């Protein structure tokens, strides 16, 4: 391979490692968002299941590892260090295999995950009091913004302990259909209605969540494919550069 071709490969690999570093930072940031967010659907699952917390720690770990790999890949590319390039290629291969394995597992376990999520939401609705500022208020926010009621439908709220044991016509305030007449609008808690004809949304939130996932499926898939393409190109470039380096020259390694 000519010197000009080696130089082009080297700087292209540097750019890809820089992109990989940025992707790692985004993945770590997403993991931190999942771990600390309390204003979205994710927050509802936190207190009821350890799965989301474990997933967020995995994302943070993968993001940190990707950032470290991007950094060492840049050093290996600029200074043409074969051991770093070989290590970079091996780590990229392992990460790509892990990502494909995780995607396959999620695909084949999607019904189980959906079932677990349904049980978590239904259990939260049964024990809803309106006093929990984390999960319950987040669920209120979801019902209010997505204009839905319950998980499968308003019937889920009939299993709520307070509503079941009450002789009054109570309903979730965040289920209130604002297009219906009345001024009793509250964001959280349980509201009282004078008649049995409750002014609530009829659609369950499972339909809204599935619609959101379908609407954003292209974006999610595009991100995954983009990361995989960057990883494959990084592997190809690192192997080409590694083969072009005849022998180690550790004098190129910067000394601090």
Image (cartoon, helix red, strand yellow):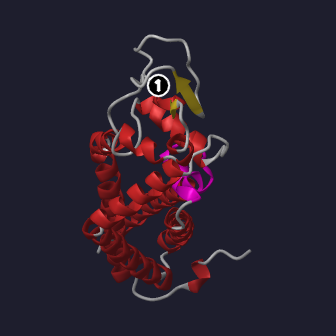
* CA neighbours of label 1 inside 10 A, class few (<14), some (14 to 19), many (20+): many
Visible residue check, residue 5: no
Identity of the residue drawn at 54% across and 48% down? 161
Look at 61% across and 44% down and name the residue there. Answer: 129
- Residue 84 on the magenta segment: no
Residue 232: x and y in percent read: 31, 67
The N terminus: image quadrant = bottom left
The residue carrying mark 1 is: 176
Determine the main secondary structure of the stretch shown in magenta. Answer: helix
Q: Position of residue 4 (x, y in %)?
A: 35, 64
What's drawn in magenta, residue-wise?
31-47
Q: Position of residue 118 (x, y in %)?
A: 39, 56
The residue nearer to you, when weighing 206 against 29, is 206
Give above or below for 186 relative to 5: above
Q: Nearer the viewer, residue 202 or 207?
A: 202
Element carrying mark 1: loop
At a point 50% along the width and 44% down the height, the residue shown is: 164
Residue placed most toward the observer, 91 or 63:
63
Q: Residue at x 50, y 20 (%)?
A: 194
Q: Position of residue 5 (x, y in %)?
A: 32, 66
Above or below, comparing residue 154 to residue 232 in the picture: above
Residue 203 appears in the figure: yes
Image quadrant holding the C terminus, namely bottom right
């Amino acid at each position: 391979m000519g010197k000009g071709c080696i130089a082009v490969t080297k700087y292209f690999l540097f750019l890809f490692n820089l992109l990989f570093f940025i992707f790692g930072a985004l993945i770590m940031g997403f993991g931190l968002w999942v771990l600390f967010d309390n204003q979205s659907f994710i927050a509802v699952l936190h207190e009821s299941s350890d799965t989301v917390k474990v997933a967020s720690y995995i994302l943070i770990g993968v993001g940190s590892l990707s950032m470290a790999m991007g950094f060492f890949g840049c050093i290996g590319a600029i200074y043409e260090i074969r051991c770093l390039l070989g290590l970079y290629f091996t780590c990229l291969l392992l990460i790509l295999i892990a990502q494909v394995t995780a995607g396959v597992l999620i695909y084949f376990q999607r019904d189980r995950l959906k079932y677990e999520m349904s049980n978590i939401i239904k259990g939260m609705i049964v024990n809803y009091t309106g006093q929990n500022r984390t999960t319950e208020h987040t669920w209120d926010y979801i019902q209010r913004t997505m204009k839905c009621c319950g998980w499968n439908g308003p019937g889920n709220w009939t299993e709520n302990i307070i509503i079941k044991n009450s002789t009054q016509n109570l309903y979730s305030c965040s289920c209130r259909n604002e297009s219906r007449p009345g001024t009793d609008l509250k964001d959280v808690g349980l509201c009282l209605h004078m008649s049995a004809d409750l002014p609530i949304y009829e659609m369950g939130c499972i339909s809204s969540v599935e619609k959101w996932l379908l609407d954003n499926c292209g974006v999610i898939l595009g991100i995954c494919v983009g990361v995989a393409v960057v990883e494959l190109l990084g592997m190809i470039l690192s192997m080409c550069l590694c083969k072009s380096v005849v022998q180690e020259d550790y004098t190129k390694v910067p000394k601090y």
